[in-house]
Image (cartoon, grey):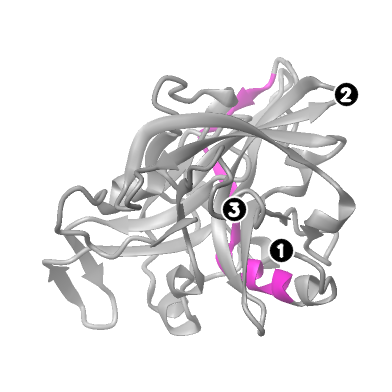
Amino acid sequence: MTYRPILPLQVSSPMPSPSEQMLYNSVRIAAVRAGVVTSYGTGFYFNLNVGLGVAPLLITNKHVIEGADALSICVHQALDDGSGPSGTHHNVNIALGEGGIVRHPDPSVDLCAIAVGELVKPGSLGGKNVYAVFLDESLIPDEQLWTDLDALEEVVMVGCPNGLFDDVNGMPIMRRGTTASHPALPYGGRQEFMIDAACFPGSSGSPIYLFNSYAFYNKPRGGIDMGSPRIKLLGVLYAGPTIDQRGRIVLTKDLGVSVQSMMHLGSAIRSTRILELAEEIRKKPSQD
């Protein structure tokens, strides 16, 4: 497996830039049942420290994989020397046995992980290695940073709205927006926040990054910091409010056709809740 630390500023060619690295972290998920694709969603790679080692995972929402017996995703092939992506990608299937699925223990938290140790082990692509960028816990804000965040922050979401992605290059879609609720405050009393961005079915499971390329407002200091990027994993999209034909607002995760209209808002689970999956993994000592 070609592991890459996520999103430190890369200055040497041919390493991808921080935003390019995001494209090698998110994947389109096609949920498959009895050989038929039933829905689309998004997932992203994450290395979770589980105490005795690191578990390579694909993070997504519970509802994305609900009812599926397999997932189909696009993976990139590494150059032979491991220095970067080769430009070749493959569609691979992941069988969903219960032993490989880790669900968040709180039924109200729409978050889960799929073990991908076998997928990313050396030589898994017919003798070639997978190239992927894995996030890790260093990208999750600590309590001090959550407190320091301003009400309006710039965010980037990387996913596959309505199942859309660049199938020629194997790349997801990037969308820019802002926080819509104060990220330092638990929205509705839950460990969640809202974003102002175009969120559509298929975007469920997308990582949401705090992404300041060159400058940002430093609230504790009361001034502008410039010169280096500020990039953190803020959360995971799981739903978005819609307006039905009667004008009622509904929080929906459904992928079916309806007369509801999206409100250009999204509901996200705080990234800190990913860490709560570690205890569930420790209960499964045979996991990859």
Residue 29 lies within the magenta run: no
Range of the magenta residues? 260-278
Residue 38, how many percent across, how many down? 78, 23
Quick check: 67 left or right of 220? right
Q: CA distance from mark 3 to mark 1?
A: 27 Å
Residue placed at 88% from the left, 52% from the top? 98
Quick check: 30 left or right of 222? right
The numbered mark at residue 34 is 2
Residue placed at 78% from the left, 63% from the top? 104
Q: CA distance from mark 1 to mark 2?
A: 25 Å
Residue 218, how many percent across, how many down? 24, 74
Does label 1 or label 2 sit earlier along the sequence?
2
Quadrant of the rendering where the C terminus is positioned: bottom right
Looking at the rendered structure, the kind of residue marked 3 is: Ala
Does label 3 or label 2 sit earlier along the sequence?
2
Pick the front one: 151 or 229: 229
Looking at the rendered structure, the kind of residue marked 1 is: Asp
Element marked by disc 1: loop
The numbered mark at residue 288 is 1
Looking at the rendered structure, the kind of residue marked 2 is: Ala
